[in-house]
Amino acid sequence: MNSNILKIKEWIVSLSPETPDFDENFNIIGSGALDSLQFLQLINLVEELSGRIVDTAEINIADFLTLDAIESKFFN
Amino acid sequence: MDKPIYIEYLDCYVPETELELASCPDLADSISPYFADSVDFLKNAKSALLLDNIRIEQRLDLKEMVMSIADRYMQSQRVDARTVKYIIMATDQSDGAKDFGHHILQRLGTPRSTVFRVTDNYCANVDVAIGLAAGLLRAEQKPSRAIIISGTRLGKGLTGRVVGTYGILGDSAAITVLSNEEGPHLAEVREQVVITRNELAEIDLTKDNTLLHLQSYTICLRELLAKSGLLPSMVDQVVFHNANELLILQVAKSCKINAKAVNNSNQGKFGHLGTCDLVLNLKTILEGGDKAIKNIVALHLGVMGTYAATHFVQ
């Protein structure tokens, strides 16, 4: 797992310690691991780690559903 | 170039009574299904909205709240009643202060005014009303004014006040007076962009609309910048609801507007005051006396899917 993706995973776990361990294909949005405010914080974290600004006019939920999707979109 | 339209007067009534969120008897019923429990809600209110309490009105109804500031306007301004052409009711709820426009007509003694009501855009009703008034006043050949009434008044407890994770509604009333007559004024109303999204045909706060809000706000703001000929660096202040600030910060970043321009001076003080937030926040900036602030952008949404961006110039 990419070190940035590991940081994102650690951040999610810190928010919801009760969430069982999950892999890169776990649906972090659909599972309820993140609420809407935390989703905004996730975008911010992805921007910080990737050095890219997410274009919120074109934002696609599919790009944030799993760690794998985040890695493909922002860290490859 | 369009005829300039000015904001001549702004006033807002905010009640003194504080409703402590933690001690609301109807807390548990009000937060379902958005929050897991009271602890979760109170933590979110404190960390995301900076709120321990909100301001609510216990003595006056909405009409009395409105009349208190309407009377203050009439006493403080020498208004030529003949120039008041429009009274626009733009309360949060479509039936708020029902039939009250004509009461104001009578109080002002205006001989020839038309009363409108802007509805269905909820917290964005006031934004839509400003755009409507500016258009109407631009078409007038003689000195003319429009008085916009906004406000929200709910019950004693927390019931109906929790808007998902977006904000917690307080009570308030506000008045905005626009004029096409050049004279002493607070700001000029320039361009406005309003977009509506048909995805939300009903209010359903159990749905998470963060993505829709992000997309719509960004499109709306970019269109406004283009229409106004504003570069992102020229935006001195962004005013928004006294609610979810993270949303606006993300939109501002995406539009390359400096985060320091996002004005949060009334966050955490009163709660989300619906259609009065625009008036209160604009008034706070304009009365602040900072003449370096020129371009102000207001960015607001209505829960049914209305998104409005308006450019004001001090």
Image (spheres, coloured by chain):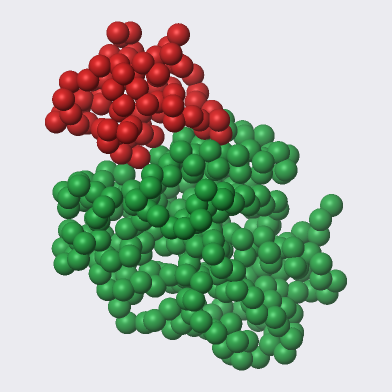
Q: Nearer the viewer, residue B300 or B75?
A: B300
Q: Is residue B146 above or below residue B312?
A: below
Q: Quadrant of residue B184?
A: bottom right
Q: Which chain is red?
A: A
- The C terminus of chain A sits in image quarter: top left
Q: Nearer the viewer, residue B166 or B145?
A: B166
Q: Position of residue B80 (x, y in %)?
A: 71, 83
Answer with left or right where residue B138 lies relative to residue B279: right
Q: Position of residue B168 (x, y in %)?
A: 34, 57
Regarding residue B184, the answer to whether it shows in the image is: no
Q: Quadrant of residue A18?
A: top left
Answer with left or right where residue B250 lies relative to residue B226: left
Q: Residue at x 56, y 68 (%)?
A: B119
Regarding residue B213, the answer to whether it shows in the image is: yes
Q: Is residue A7 above or below residue A16?
A: above
Q: Residue at x 28, y 50 (%)?
A: B34
Q: Quadrant of residue B110?
A: bottom right
Answer with left or right where residue B307 lies relative to residue B82: left
Q: Nearer the viewer, residue B181 or B154?
A: B154
Q: Residue at x 74, y 86 (%)?
A: B112
Q: Which chain is green?
A: B
